[in-house]
Image: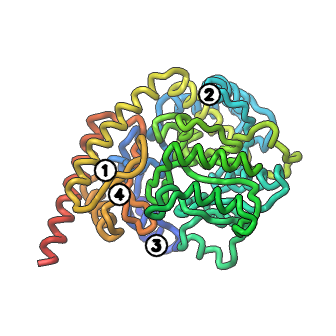
């Protein structure tokens, strides 16, 4: 290896010099990472970090799962198809078969699977376009604090003003309504129903109502079953499609494969991405009820609509973790562990409280400055964790679902110590 290349591995100057200013997570987590396994990441200095970020819920099954890795290596060494547009491949067939047998059929879902470009935003774009084509309408109803991506259509449905400002032009085609619990004393579902039913309510008849059942980037706001059921009924009564964006909340993150499983609703469209590949490989798709599967050939396309390497690992993920109830049952126990440890941390901060559902949890500490300081100190202590919320005020836990109990406890010990030290520093500064 040339000398200059060997030196660059532990020198972050190359990133500052050449990588775009759009880089984000690495600003608060500046280590150069070289390897990872399970819930541990290692950097170029040999230091281990416990991962409570998991690729922003793209690594629900941890880093480098051995069974997925072995299947992928076998595929590579056998010269298996790497890129196939949307051609039929054995890897795609095996994934679809596993997904049908272990995910769709047991849940009574008749949805077809549309493979989109490899990002969640592309899946959202496809779902929005599909709803508009199916209904002949253009308006999409989305909600405050929702985050659906930063491409133009998805960005129109995203509430975050910072990201919307990045478009530098108008984003259109969406009516935004208050999410469940957004405004004190306001029944958000009742307001939506009243405005849609009133000819002077000012809302154009919607093609779809789109929401996350736990708002990942919006601060872990969790919709109640009553709200979700009512919104589903409103969509049905007004001939609109129901889109549940399960990109971050799906694949087990809330305790079931889908975030809506215990809500008593069946969405018309479900965008999926992030952990659907199981291995951190790019893959995105939309589940669509057959009657709404109306795109013509290549009407929504992309060069990478179907990553065969991701199909290989995704099949293993489905078969390994979802072929019976064992993994799902254990998620309930793990969720209780997270709630208990986060509850103790929330009790340390005046006015703090828990948010989220299942294994998608966090603590609202009241300010982005405090949350950021806690996460910074936690990183210094060997824990990778980030914030979310409209003011970044929520310390958000997205640890791999497979994290061993002892490692969970060690990570929470670091987070608890970071919280205590940050509060102590603030108290001293206030004197």
Residue 391 placed where, x, y %?
A: 41, 69
Ranked by sequence position, the earlier of labels 3 and 2 is 3
First of labels 2, 1 by sequence position: 1
Q: Nearer the viewer, residue 350 or 420?
A: 350
Q: Residue furthest right?
A: 296
Q: Which is nearer the eye, 207 or 421?
A: 207
Query: What separation in Å lies between label 2 and label 1 (alpha carbons)?
Result: 44 Å
Query: Rounded to the nearest whole Å, what is the CA distance between mark 1 and mark 4?
Result: 26 Å
Answer few, some or many: residues within 10 Å of disc 1's Cα (few below 14, many 20 plus, some between 14 and 19).
few
State how far apart marks 3 and 1 are (Cα).
22 Å
Compared with 144, 413 (above or below) is above
In the depicted view, which residue is nearer to us: 191 or 182?
191
User: For mark 2, what is the residue?
Assistant: 107
Quarter in which the C terminus is drawn: bottom left
Q: Which mark is residue 16?
A: 3
On the image, numbered disc 1 is attached to which residue?
Answer: 46
| Corner quadrant of residue 155 | bottom right
Residue to which mark 4 is pinned: 395
Earlier in the chain: of badge 2 and badge 4, it is 2
Tag in front: 2 or 1: 2
Please name the residue shown 45% across and 67% down the image: 390
């Amino acid at each position: 290896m040339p000398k200059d290349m060997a030196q660059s591995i532990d020198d972050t100057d190359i990133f500052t010099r050449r990588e775009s200013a759009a880089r984000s997570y690495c600003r608060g987590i500046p280590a150069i990472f070289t390897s990872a396994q399970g819930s541990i990441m290692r950097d170029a200095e040999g230091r281990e970090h416990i991962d409570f970020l998991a690729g922003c819920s793209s690594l629900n099954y941890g880093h480098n799962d051995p069974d997925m890795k072995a299947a992928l290596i076998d595929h590579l060494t056998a010269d298996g198809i790497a890129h196939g547009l949307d051609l039929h491949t054995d890897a795609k067939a095996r994934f679809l078969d596993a997904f049908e047998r272990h995910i769709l059929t047991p849940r009574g879902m008749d949805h077809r699977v549309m493979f989109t470009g490899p990002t969640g935003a592309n899946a959202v774009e496809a779902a929005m376009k599909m709803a508009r084509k199916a209904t002949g309408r253009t308006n999409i109803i989305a909600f405050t604090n929702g985050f659906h991506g930063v491409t133009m259509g998805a960005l129109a449905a995203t509430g975050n003003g910072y990201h919307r400002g990045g478009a530098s032009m108008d984003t259109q085609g969406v009516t935004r309504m208050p999410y469940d619990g957004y405004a004190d004393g306001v029944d958000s579902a009742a307001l939506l129903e009243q405005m849609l039913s009133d000819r002077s309510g000012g809302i154009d008849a919607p093609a779809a109502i789109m929401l996350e059942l736990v708002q990942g980037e919006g601060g872990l706001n969790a919709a109640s079953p009553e709200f979700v059921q009512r919104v589903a009924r409103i969509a049905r009564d007004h001939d609109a499609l129901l889109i549940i964006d399960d990109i971050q909340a799906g694949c087990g993150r809330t305790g079931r494969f889908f975030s809506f499983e215990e809500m008593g609703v069946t969405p018309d469209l479900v965008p999926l991405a992030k952990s659907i590949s199981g291995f951190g490989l790019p893959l995105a798709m939309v589940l669509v009820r057959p009657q709404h599967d109306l795109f013509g050939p290549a009407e929504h396309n992309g060069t990478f609509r179907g990553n065969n390497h991701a199909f290989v690992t995704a099949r293993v993920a489905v078969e390994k973790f979802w072929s019976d109830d064992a993994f799902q049952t254990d998620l309930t126990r793990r969720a209780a562990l997270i709630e208990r440890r986060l509850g103790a941390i929330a009790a340390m901060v005046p006015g703090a409280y828990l948010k989220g559902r299942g294994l998608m949890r966090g603590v609202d500490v009241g300010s982005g400055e405090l949350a950021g300081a806690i996460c910074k100190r936690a990183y210094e202590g060997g824990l990778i964790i980030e914030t979310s919320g409209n003011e970044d005020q929520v310390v958000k836990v997205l640890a791999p679902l497979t994290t061993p109990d002892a490692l969970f406890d060690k990570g929470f010990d670091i987070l608890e110590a970071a919280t205590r030290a940050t509060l102590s520093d603030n108290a001293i500064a206030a004197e």
